[in-house]
Image: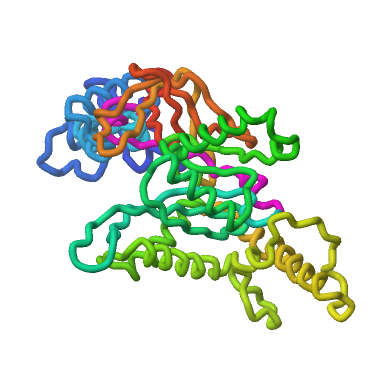
Amino acid sequence: MQENKQLESKCKLLCLSPFMDTNTNLIRVGGRIGTSNYPFNKRHPILLDSSHHISKLYFEREHIRNLHAGPQLLLSIIRESVWPINGRKLARRIVKNCVTCTRVRGQTLYPKMGNLPAYRVSVDYPFKSVGVDYAGPFFILNRKGRGAKLLKCYLCLFVCLRFKCVHLEAVSDLTKEAYIMTLRRFVARRGKPTEIYSDNGRNFVAAAKDITKFLNDNQQSLSEFASEEGIKFNFIPAYAPHFGGIWEAGVKSAKYHIKRVMGNTHLTFEELCTLFAQVEAILNSRPLCPMSSSPNDFLSLSPGHFIIGRPLNALPAPSLEESKENNLQRYARLEQIRQVFWRRWQREYISELQSRTKWRADTTRLNVGDLVLLHEDNVPPLNWRLGRVSRLFPGPDGISRVADINTIRGSVRRPLVRLCPLPTAGETQA
């Protein structure tokens, strides 16, 4: 351009018709508005390289001077006097790395969806691994007739983590004793599970401590077989309902039917228990997966298929799937039907669990020592607590989804979906 030569056809500046200003020895934009009445700097702004440090400082100054303008507004203000090359990309980076704008946005992390644990995809009896959750409250009458008082009642949902079988119980209050009695009724009807998963509700934690303490205190007096049959309690991290999505979905489905049938009416405790049992039967009749394309399959596979015929102390049975029906006795015939259900579950349902519906890529870049904001409900982002990551908990796939955060109130454990990372010094200077 200093030698008044034509630019190459592949030059990125050719669309701007640049020229050399002889007075200032600066490259300016020729453009198409040279005949307008705008000022000279507006018609022919100075060309700047967005990768230069001066351009970055100029963008940051205008971003703060214009009350933290967004990328589009910031770029339009900059172009009043200068024309940055790839300015839109620089404007987005300046706004993204602004600490104040990051705190106002309050955008949390979304790590890649984890793999299903073994108890979700392995073949075993129903309700051997269960998840528990509460729903409600539901208002009930203490008795029939005039003068009845309204009381609160709750729904306790047990869901099989393998076959999505549902068991609903009505609970009168949210105490440890009520939860233990509910658990006893569940064990008496469905058999004792080996592990129970739930959130960090106070009643769940108290019941787990009480039962665990009872087993530990009486371990010497109990026989060796009984001590091995203890129930293992597992709790998901606090403020992480997506860790227990299977029982959260069960609560949503149960409330869908209960609200439409119950409406604004007030039932008695017996009527509510009857309604819960009917809703339980409906939920256990839902198909687990789309119906197969075979014309011989008239019924879809449902959780109810795995509940029927399960003994509390079942013995292992040989494989009877390939045997002829005419050569089997009645007990063997029932065992063959049960094994066919499991084979269909492995062939049809497990394949539906392969794909990830969301959170398909790991975009989190969180390290120990990073500053984060703790997402809190019903609190604006500018009032979220500030903390520093002290420990990460990577999963079996190497992706961290839970972290320990040091705050002014002590150390807390939170999932990454409740953390908003703040820009570091390296990102700001990039």
Residue 269 image position (x, y, % from top left): 36, 61
Spot the residue most to the right: 327
For the residue pair 299 and 402, the one nearer the viewer reads as 299
Q: Position of residue 355 (x, y in %)?
A: 59, 54
Q: Is residue 116 left or right of residue 378?
A: right
The image shows residue 197 at horizontal and vertical percentages of 54, 43
Front residue of 325 and 370: 325
Which image quadrant is residue 7 in?
Answer: top left
**Residue appearing at x 85%, y 75% in the figure:** 329
Magenta-colored stretch includes residue 270: no
295 vs 384: above or below: below
Q: Is residue 264 visible?
A: yes
Is 284 placed left or right of 44 in the picture? right
Which quadrant, please, contains the C terminus? top left
Is 87 in front, or is 356? 356
Q: Nearer the viewer, residue 200 or 74?
A: 200
112 in the magenta segment: yes
Rendering coords of residue 319 (x, y %):
84, 63
Q: What residue do we see at 74% from left, 39% from top? A: 225
Left or right: 17 in relation to 320: left
What's the magenta region?
A: 97-123
State left or right for residue 378 relative to residue 278: left
The part of the image, by quadrant, that contains residue 384 is: top left
- Which residue in the rendered view is the most extreme toward the left? 37
